Amino acid sequence: MYNPIKDGIDKSVRLVSYIEESPPSDLLDYVHCFWELKTLKPLNENFVYHILPDACVNLLFDQSSVNIAAITALQMNHKKLDLGKQFHYVGVQLIPGVWNGDPSEIKSDLVDSPYLGELSLVEVNKKLLNLNFNLQKDILSKFVFELIDKQLIRNNELIAEILKNFDDIQSISDIAGITGLSTRQLQRRIKEALGITPHDFLKILRVHQSFKHHYLDYYTDQSHFIHSFRKITGFTPDKYNKKFDV
């Protein structure tokens, strides 16, 4: 199953904690993980978080300011977010394709303003406040179930089939063969589900899977791998592994 790597935390930074936990078994088709990112004490310099596109949507809650929450995702471009010297975020990373809410609500930049949408993100954020992460996971799980009941999160059979068979996929034609859809149908349905093209979806998956498998499993040669990796992450594989805690 698809297991995207975490976003880039510079190895030189010692006072930033990132943890993630698997969801309960009845949410495995919808949630990749629950996560927490926070400073252990105020930093001397602003922390820059290197965000990678992974085709996932996140439900993000700012515990330092409970009115700030958002639905977030990146398209194809990595980003550097200046989070300042002190921060505390909690979130839910959803499986690609399961978010069925309003796509116009999805943010791709630094979230620093109050949430004004119709979802109960702020109410949930208030419930999370001052609880340890284990208790927060229970609240987040309950919220995900509520979103499932409202059909704002639901299983996307097409994306699930692609993720299940990804090791056997080398091209869009392979996806068409596995799913029984035409190339035009794939273009439309993947764009609707993820906001990106099928080709871009494959590029993202390959880079993330390359952290856990030999790159020749997904690329024709080393040059192809380095070019694709740099386009997605902003670094060559060697420089990325040296700079970030992977």
Image (cartoon, rainbow, N blue to C red):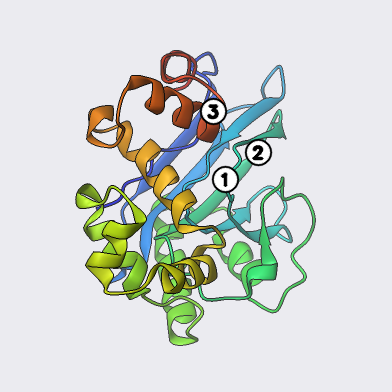
Quadrant of residue 163 within the rendered picture: bottom left
Quadrant of residue 179 within the rendered picture: bottom left
* Disc 2 residue crowd, few under 14, some 14–19, many 20+, Cα 10 Å: some
Query: In front: mark 2 or mark 1?
Result: 1
Left or right relative to 87: residue 147:
left
State whether residue 99 appears in this view: yes
Left or right relative to 21: residue 129:
right
Q: Nearer the viewer, residue 116 or 194?
A: 194
From the top left corner, tell me how far across and down residue 117 is, in percent.
73, 74
Circle on res. 84: none
* Disc 3 residue crowd, few under 14, some 14–19, many 20+, Cα 10 Å: some
Left or right relative to 234: residue 20:
left
Left or right relative to 140: residue 117:
right
From the top left corner, tell me how far across and down residue 27 is, in percent.
31, 68
The residue at which mark 2 appears reads as 87
Q: Residue at x 57, y 45 (%)?
A: 76
Quadrant of residue 28 within the rendered picture: bottom left
Q: Nearer the viewer, residue 131 or 8?
A: 8
Q: Residue at x 31, y 53 (%)?
A: 22
The span from disc 2 to disc 1 (Cα, nearest Å) is 26 Å
Looking at the image, how many numbered discs can be counted on the residues?
A: 3
Circle on res. 76: 1
Furthest toward the bottom, the residue is: 150
